Each structure stands twice: as structure tokens, then as C-alpha cells.
Image (spheres, grey):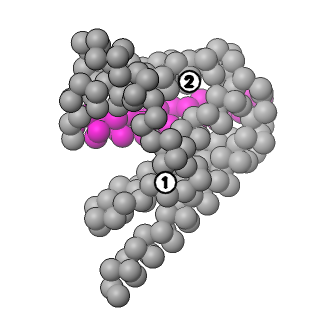
């Protein structure tokens, strides 16, 4: 939802900075991933510090695309690497929150965190499978930026259970939205 509405809105303001950067976009992808892994190891013991690291990792994840587009370094491998590391990041964060819920004695939170992770993976899979069918599928209310923002909010506020319920419900609703979208696209082609 945010991605579809805002797209590359930061490209223009960050363009002068991105032009001066000599590091590769893949450096930013890897750095963002490593910072997110550090966030995951931090969350169970210090959620607020984990939230700061999530936002820092997200900034690096945003920069990789801006640097690639601004400097003409967009590659298929870069896009592939970014997608794969994003899935690993999602897994690390969800498992970290599940571990935090274990430490808090919140069994429901453990279930919701793992269930939301399944939804997040299916959102990504639905998009990839639609792409393999030649269909664009950036549809849905709970794409990755929204999930990362909500996880950071949970870390800062401590409202893990309500946010996990929201993530759980909305990730699976997004999968359903994507299924319906692809079905409509396929039906359009038949007529």
C-alpha cells in the first residue's frame, strides 16, 4: 500500500546524496540485512533498542534502491538479492518477537508472530508467482513497509499483542486480496 502510493518519492530529494555515494547498492542491501539481524537479536532483551535498529536497517534497505536507480546500477541480481534478504529479515524479526513473547509468557503472541510470518511469506510468494504468470501484483494493504513500521511501533510502545493481531489478520487478508486480484487479471485475459 505505501509502496504503491509513495513509490520512489525519496528518489528526487536523495538524488544529490546518492550520486556521491561510491558504494554499490548491494552493499546497502547487505548492511541493512545485517543491521536487521542485529535488531532481531536485540529485541528479546531490549525492544526499544531493537526498534531503533529496525528503523536504521530500513533506512539502508531504502537507500539501496535509491542508489541503484540514481547511479544507473539497477540489476536483476540486485533486485533478487534484496528480495531474498528481505525474506530472511522478516523471518529473523518474527522469530525475535516470538522469542520475546516466550520470555513474557505470552503463548498467544508466539502463535501470532509465527502466523504473521507465514502471511508475510505468502504475500511475497503470491507476488512472485503472479510475476511468473506475467501479472503485476503490488496489491494489498499490508506490504513490507507497513509490516516493518508496525513492528518498530510495537518495539517502541510495548503493544506487541495488539500489533501482532493486526499483523496476523492483515497479512492474511493481503494474501486474499492478491489471490482475488490475480484471478480478476486472469479472467480479463480470457475475455
Asked if 121 appears above or below 63 in the picture, the reply is below
Asked if 65 appears above or below 137 in the picture, the reply is above
Residue at mark 1: 123
114 vs 121, nearest the viewer: 121
The range drawn in magenta is 77-105
Asked if residue 29 lies left or right of residue 180, the reply is left
- Secondary structure, mark 1, is helix
Q: Which label number is shown at residue 54?
A: 2
Q: Quadrant of the C terminus?
A: bottom left
In reply to whether residue 100 is colored magenta, the answer given is yes
The number of numbered badges drawn on the structure is 2
39 vs 8, nearest the viewer: 8
Tell me residue 5's x, y (percent): 52, 47
Tell me residue 14's x, y (percent): 41, 21
Residue 188 visible at all: yes
Q: How dense is the environment of label 2, judged by Cα within 10 Å: few (below 14), some, or many (20 and up)?
A: many
Asked if residue 126 lies left or right of residue 44, the reply is left
In reply to whether residue 31 is colored magenta, the answer given is no
Quarter location, residue 138: bottom left
Q: CA distance from mark 2 to mark 1?
A: 20 Å
Amino acid at each position: 500500500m505505501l509502496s504503491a502510493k509513495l513509490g520512489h518519492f525519496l528518489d528526487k530529494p536523495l538524488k544529490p546524496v546518492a550520486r556521491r555515494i561510491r558504494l554499490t547498492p548491494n552493499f546497502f542491501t547487505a548492511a541493512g540485512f545485517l543491521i536487521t539481524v542485529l535488531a532481531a537479536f536485540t529485541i528479546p532483551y531490549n525492544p526499544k533498542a531493537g526498534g531503533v535498529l529496525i528503523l536504521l536497517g530500513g533506512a539502508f534497505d531504502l537507500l539501496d534502491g535509491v542508489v541503484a536507480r540514481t547511479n544507473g546500477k539497477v540489476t536483476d541480481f540486485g533486485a533478487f538479492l534484496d528480495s531474498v534478504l528481505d525474506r530472511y529479515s522478516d523471518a529473523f524479526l518474527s522469530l525475535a518477537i516470538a522469542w520475546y513473547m516466550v520470555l513474557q509468557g505470552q503463548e498467544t503472541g508466539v502463535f501470532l508472530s509465527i502466523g504473521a510470518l507465514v502471511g508475510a511469506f505468502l504475500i511475497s510468494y503470491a507476488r512472485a508467482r503472479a510475476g511468473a504468470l506475467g501479472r503485476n501484483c503490488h496489491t494489498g494493504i499490508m506490504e513490507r513497509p507497513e509490516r516493518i513500521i508496525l513492528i518498530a511501533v510495537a518495539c517502541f510502545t510495548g503493544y506487541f499483542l495488539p500489533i501482532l493481531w493486526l499483523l496476523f489478520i492483515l497479512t492474511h487478508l493481503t494474501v486474499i486480496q492478491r489471490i482475488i486480484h490475480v484471478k480478476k487479471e486472469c479472467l480479463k485475459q480470457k475475455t
